[in-house]
Image: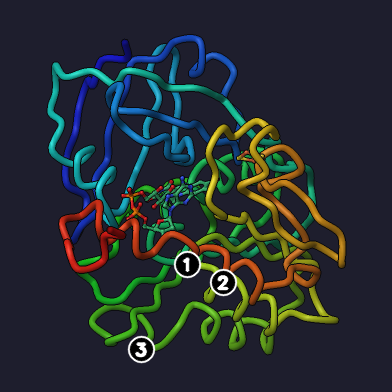
Amino acid sequence: MFPVLQKRKLSENTYLMEIEAPEIAKKAKAGQFLVLRIDEKGERIPLTIADSDKKVITIVFLVVGKTTTELSLLKKGDSLLDVVGPLGNPSKIQEYGNVVIIGGGLGIAPIYPITKALKQAKNKVTAIIGAKSKDHLFWEDRFKEISDRVLIATDDGSKGKKGFVSDVLKELMQKEKIDLVIAIGPPIMMKAVSDVTRDRIKTIVSLNPIMVDGMGMCGGCRVVVDGKVKFACCDGPEFNGHQIDWSELMNRNKTYSDEEKCALGDAGRCQK
Ligand SMILES: Cc1cc2nc3c(=O)[nH]c(=O)nc-3n(C[C@H](O)[C@H](O)[C@H](O)COP(=O)(O)OP(=O)(O)OC[C@H]3O[C@@H](n4cnc5c(N)ncnc54)[C@H](O)[C@@H]3O)c2cc1C
Ligand code: FES
C-alpha cells in the first residue's frame, strides 16, 4: 500500500497529491511517469512524476473522468493499492543553450522537473505556462524560482497574454534565437507548438496515449512517429514533435469515450 501524505487543490479541477513511495522517489528522473491503481476494482492510469524527494513523490492531476474523480476524493491517511514506477525514458538533459519549455493545462506540472533539470544543466530556460483562465493556472511562483523567465497565456486573457501558448512562442521566436522547444499538454496544443517551430527549431513533446501496463506489453499506447509504430511507454514518452501522426493519436484517444462516460454514470452511453 502507498500512503497519501497530502492532497490539496491547486486550481480549478486540478489537485496535487504527495504519496509515500521511497523506492520510486529514489530512482525518479525528470520526464518519467508512474501507473497507479486506487483499489482492486480500479483501472490503471498513468500520471507524470511532478516532483520527488527522498521518500515522497508528487503527482498533479486534472479531474477528467472516473479514476481522477476518485483520486480527488482521497485524503491524507488513505492509501493507493498499487503505484508502479518510475516508467518511461527520462528526458535528455544537457546544455542546449536557450531553451523554451511550454506547459499547457495539465502539462504545467510535468514540465516542472524538466525545467529544474535543464536549469541545473546551465541552460537559459524560459517557461511558458498557459490555461483556460487564471483560475486554471498554478505554480507561477515555483517556475519563477527555477527558470530565467516565466511567460503566461490564458484563453480568456484573465492573466498574461490573451491567446494560446503557441502565440507567445511565435512572438518570442521573432525576438531571439531559440535552440530547443519542449512542449507538454493536450495533443492539440503540442501539435500547434510543433507546427509553429517546424523546419526552424527542434521540438520535443511528451505523448499521452491510453496506457495500460506502461511497460511495453499491451500495445495500448501505440503511436506513429516518422511513419513507424512506437510504444509511447517504453520508446518515449518524449518524441520529436515534427514526426508525430497527430490525427492518429487524437483519434485513438477517443476510442473508449462511450465507456468513459458510462463509467461516470451516463447510463445512455453504456453498452447493453
Ligand atoms: C505518460 C502519461 C502521463 C500523464 N501524466 C498526467 C499528469 O501528470 N496529470 C494528469 O492530469 N494527467 C496525466 N495523464 C493523463 C491521465 O492518465 C488521464 O487523464 C487519466 O487516465 C484519466 O482517467 P479517468 O478515469 O479520470 O478519465 P476517463 O474518463 O477514463 O478518460 C478521460 C480521458 O483521459 C485519457 N485516458 C483515460 N484512460 C487513460 C489511460 N489509461 N492512459 C492514458 N490516458 C487515459 C483519455 O484521453 C480519455 O479520453 C498522463 C497520461 C500519460 C500517457
Ligand atoms: S502501455 Fe502497454 S505497451 Fe505501452
Residue visible at 42% across and 34% down in the picture: 44
Q: Quadrant of the C terminus?
A: bottom left
Residue type for callout 3: Lys
Res 259 → quadrant: bottom left
Distance from Cα at disc 1 to Cα at disc 3: 29 Å
**Residue at disc 1, CB closer than 8 Å to ligand 1:** yes
Residue type for callout 2: Asn
Mark positioned earlier in the residue sequence (1 or 3)? 3
Q: 253 or 272: nearer the eye?
A: 272
Q: Percent x, y for residue 19?
A: 32, 22
CB under 8 Å between discs 2 and 1: yes
Distance from Cα at disc 2 to Cα at disc 1: 5 Å
Q: Percent x, y for residue 61?
A: 33, 47
Q: Is residue 31 left or right of residue 94?
A: left
Q: Is residue 8 left or right of residue 113?
A: left
**Which dot marks residue 162?**
3
Whether residue 149 is visible: no
Res 211 → quadrant: top right
Q: 105 or 147: nearer the eye?
A: 105
In the rendered image, which residue does mark 1 sit on?
Answer: 254
In the rendered image, which residue does mark 2 sit on?
Answer: 251
Residue type for callout 1: Lys
